[in-house]
Image (cartoon, grey):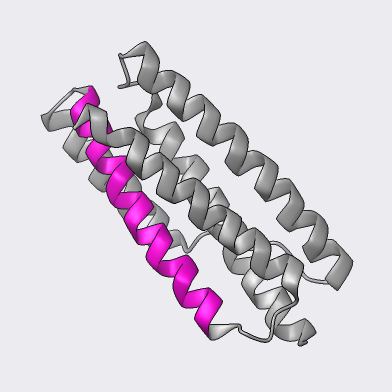
Amino acid sequence: MSTKETISILKECDAGVKMALASLDDVWEHVQHSELRAILNTTRAQHQSVGREVQQLLEEYGGREKDPNGVARKMSAVVTKTRLGLEKSDTACARVLAEGCDMGIQSLHRYLNRYRGAEVPARALCRTLVAIEEQLSRDLRQFM
């Protein structure tokens, strides 16, 4: 197994967790339904937990954490702010987050395919993130 690939996939997972948490923060003030808030609290806790595991493994492998791409993060924030400014509803929040889940799932699968030589624990964390994103996407459907 490759240490370089292990660090690479962990860095991408780290950036993905940070992007997901930032997206949750972006919509939070617009969420009105208590059940949607509960779902978002659950997924926030799951992302934070996986994020801690990712950072721990990164440290063990001698890697550094990675922040999300600055342009992508700013674009995401602007799009979210614009869309929620036009339509202030739980439906709009759910749509924005579901689209983010879809992009995250695609990216994570791309990293799983690209870094096939990564150590099993790193690949397992990436798969855990995929599962969290897939579950959130399913949970959001009732609000669309």
* Picture quadrant where residue 139 is located: top left
Q: Residue furthest left?
A: 86
* Picture quadrant where residue 73 is located: bottom left
Give the quarter of the figure containing the C terminus: top left
> Principal SS element in the magenta part?
helix
Position of residue 52 in the picture relative to residue 94 (left or right): right
Magenta part of the protein: which range?
Answer: 90-113
Where residue 77 sits: x, y (%)? 34, 45
Depth check, front residue: 23 or 134: 134
Q: Residue at x 28, y 50 (%)?
A: 99
Magenta span contains residue 37 = no
Where residue 10 sits: x, y (%)? 67, 67
Q: Judge whether 7 appears above or below 105 on screen.
A: below
**How many dots with numbers?**
0
Where residue 108 sits: x, y (%)? 49, 66
Depth check, front residue: 102 or 26: 102
Q: Residue at x 80, y 62 (%)?
A: 57
Give the quarter of the figure containing the N terminus: bottom right
Q: Which residue lies furthest to the right in this view?
A: 60
Q: Judge whether 29 appears above or below 104 on screen.
A: above
Query: Visible in this render: residue 76?
Result: yes
Q: Which residue is drawn at 72% across and 77% down?
A: 6
Where residue 85 sits: x, y (%)? 17, 30
Position of residue 123 in the picture relative to residue 136 (left or right): right
Position of residue 131 in the picture relative to residue 93 (left or right): right
Q: Judge whether 103 appears above or below 114 on screen.
A: above
Magenta span contains residue 91 = yes
Query: Visible in this render: residue 67?
Result: no
Depth check, front residue: 61 or 139: 139
